[in-house]
Image (cartoon, grey):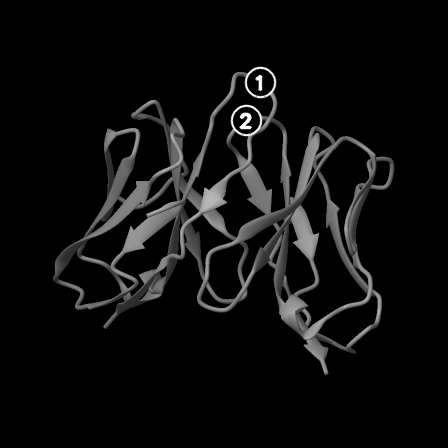
Amino acid sequence: QKEVEQDPGPLSVPEGAIVSLNCTYSNSAFQYFMWYRQYSRKGPELLMYTYSSGNKEDGRFTAQVDKSSKYISLFIRDSQPSDSATYLCACSRGAQKLVFGQGTRLTINP
Amino acid sequence: ETGVTQTPRHLVMGMTNKKSLKCEQHLGHNAMYWYKQSAKKPLELMFVYSLEERVENNSVPSRFSPECPNSSHLFLHLHTLQPEDSALYLCASSQDPVGGTDTQYFGPGTRLTVL
């Protein structure tokens, strides 16, 4: 079993829709949870970072962590074509070692 | 130059060639990483350097040899690669604090094709 599972998609939604991206993980020792966005031919860039359980909001993006069910989510409100990218979730027990999900390829259609 | 840069951006090599990938970070960070990104697979951590010392080597074949001469530069020397080594190789850096976790900043990657 992979430590972090993520549906690779692809996921295609119309502009303006609410997008929900999800990951599950198996290691209860994970304390830090991140979402990275990767555009085509670019490296991943950090989008959201959460410590332990709870919600975090940044503009149109909301990250949720439910440690009891080992489930992490990223919501994108009022999605834009510029949000089209691959979204990677990552989990960590501490410094340095991130464990990534496979990534979900998202397309927002105008 | 800002952030994390990688050269070359694209590389095609034969199985008997020797080549090197270069990474440079301009962020004043103390830790640097090499990752491999293959199609339909999660990013795989290959090597971690903290303060120029290798602290992690995730069972990577010896045909990949990292070098970290200082905290700003990281190399990945390639020798006698296999076609299955074709992938996007990403370099990252982080501040490397004691305890907690630190944000990793990625370069654009080197797209490697092994013929």
User: Which chain contains the residue that carries disc 1?
Assistant: B
Q: Is residue B49 left or right of residue A72?
A: left
Residue picked out by circle 2: A95
Quarter of the image where one finds residue B3: top left
Q: Do labels 1 and 2 share a chain?
A: no
Residue picked out by circle 1: B99
Q: Among all residues in the image, which is located at the extreme top? A: B98
The kind of residue tagged 1 is: Gly
> Which class describes the residues within 10 Å of circle 1: few (<14), some (14-19), or many (20+)?
few
Q: What element carries label 1?
A: loop
Quarter the C terminus of chain B occupies:
bottom left
Residue A51 image offset from top left, x and y in percent: 73, 31
At 56% from the left and 39% from the top, the residue drawn is A98
- Name the foreground residue: B91 vs A76: A76
Quarter of the image where one finds residue B54: top left
Residue A21 seen in this snapshot = yes
Q: Residue A59 carries which label?
A: none
Give the alpha-carbon distance from disc 1 to disc 2, as whole Å: 6 Å
At 29% from the left and 34% from the top, the residue drawn is B72
- Name the foreground residue: A45 vs A82: A82
> Which class describes the residues within 10 Å of circle 2: few (<14), some (14-19), or many (20+)?
some
Q: Is residue B63 above or below residue A17?
A: above
At 66% from the left and 47% from the top, the residue drawn is A4
Residue A20 image offset from top left, x and y in percent: 81, 61
User: Which chain contains the residue that carries disc 2?
Assistant: A
Q: Is residue A97 left or right of residue A28?
A: left
CB under 8 Å between callouts 1 and 2?
yes
Q: Among all residues in the image, which is located at the extreme front? A: B1
Q: What element carries label 2?
A: loop
The kind of residue tagged 2 is: Ala
Residue A66 image offset from top left, x and y in percent: 85, 40
